[in-house]
Image (cartoon, helix red, strand yellow):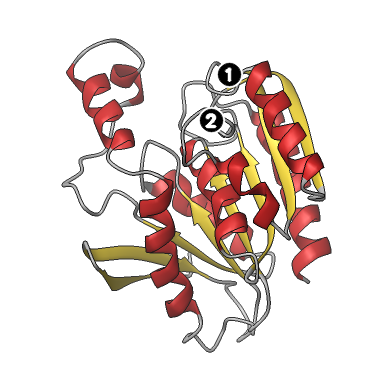
């Protein structure tokens, strides 16, 4: 795995980010900001970042929980009510769209200094809660983000003032939303609201449902990991980024 860590200074402290690039060659390659899911940085996400990087990208995976001391979650304990589930919910609630977009500003500034990074529009990718951050990045940095992809993203079109769908008028990126067929965090009401917002804003987009797949299906290590649906997500993702960034 061709990975190294960088520590970036933000107004809230030191953000640790993990950068992956192809095993061979010197670039330059297009960049992708990969937003973690609610379980945080862990080897499975690193493996996914490297898999994407191997197709010709510099992938940066920022630790969005850097403000709070964090121990890895046990998915089995998170799945049931108890202290671990409460800690999980607390970590998710500790960040939001505006906070993560401030962090993204620092990440983008760092990418601009890296010789292997191609100075061209980049991609934003997110899983679970990170899906919303990928869409938010498209609306917050329209001159930088050419393509944004969300997989089993939750809370994409809520009543909250920082809901990603409200940024649709600012988006210039291609948008892909791979929704889980079984996902209480992205009900039909939100799907319709997101579809309407993107359509009215003239955003090139696809919202696709992975039937019978559950929230979290794409990430290995989840209790609901679905290999067939995950491999389908890889096909969609790689084609989308190839068409847009290369």
| The quarter of the displayed image where residue 239 is located | bottom right
Percent across and percent down for residue 219 are 53, 36
Percent across and percent down for residue 65 are 29, 48
Res 131 seen here: yes
Crowdedness near tag 2: few (<14), some (14–19) or many (≥20) residues, C-alpha within 10 Å: many
Residue 183's disc is 1
* Residue appearing at x 78%, y 72% in the figure: 246
Residue 154's disc is 2
Observer-nearest of 189 and 85: 189
Crowdedness near tag 1: few (<14), some (14–19) or many (≥20) residues, C-alpha within 10 Å: some
200 vs 10: above or below: above
Q: Are marks 1 and 2 in contact (CB under 8 Å)?
A: yes
Res 3 seen here: no
Percent across and percent down for residue 61 are 44, 59
| The quarter of the displayed image where residue 164 is located | top right
Seen in the image, is 15 located left or right of residue 18? Answer: left
Seen in the image, is 246 located left or right of residue 31? Answer: right
Secondary structure state at the residue bearing disc 2: loop
Observer-nearest of 242 and 89: 89
Outermost residue on the top side: it is 81
157 vs 198: above or below: above
Percent across and percent down for residue 139 are 61, 56
* Residue appearing at x 68%, y 70% in the figure: 56
Seen in the image, is 171 located left or right of residue 31? Answer: right
Spatial CA distance of label 1 from label 2 is: 8 Å
Residue 70's disc is none
Observer-nearest of 85 and 53: 85
Total marks shown come to 2
The mark that comes first in sequence, 1 or 2, is: 2
């Amino acid at each position: 795995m061709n990975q190294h860590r960088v520590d970036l200074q933000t107004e809230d402290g030191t953000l640790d980010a993990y950068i992956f690039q192809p095993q061979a060659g010197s670039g330059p390659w297009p960049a992708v900001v990969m937003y973690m899911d609610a379980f945080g940085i862990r080897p499975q996400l690193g493996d996914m970042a490297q898999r994407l990087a191997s197709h010709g990208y510099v992938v940066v995976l920022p630790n969005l929980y850097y403000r709070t001391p964090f121990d890895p979650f046990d998915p089995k304990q998170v799945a049931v009510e108890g202290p671990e589930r409460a800690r999980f919910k607390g970590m998710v609630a500790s960040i939001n769209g505006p906070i993560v977009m401030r962090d993204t500003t620092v990440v983008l500034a760092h990418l601009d200094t890296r010789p292997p990074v191609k100075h061209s529009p980049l991609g934003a990718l997110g899983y679970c809660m990170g899906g919303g951050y990928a869409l938010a990045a498209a609306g917050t940095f329209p001159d930088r983000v050419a393509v944004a992809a969300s997989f089993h993203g939750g809370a994409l079109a809520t009543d909250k003032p920082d809901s990603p769908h409200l940024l649709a008028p600012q988006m210039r990126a291609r948008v892909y939303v791979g929704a889980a067929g079984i996902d209480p965090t992205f009900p039909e009401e939100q799907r319709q609201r997101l579809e309407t917002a993107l359509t009215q804003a003239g955003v090139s987009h696809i919202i696709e449902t992975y039937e019978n797949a559950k929230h979290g299906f794409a990430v290995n290590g989840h209790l609901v990991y679905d290999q067939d649906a995950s491999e389908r997500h890889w096909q969609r993702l790689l084609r989308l980024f190839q068409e847009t960034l290369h």
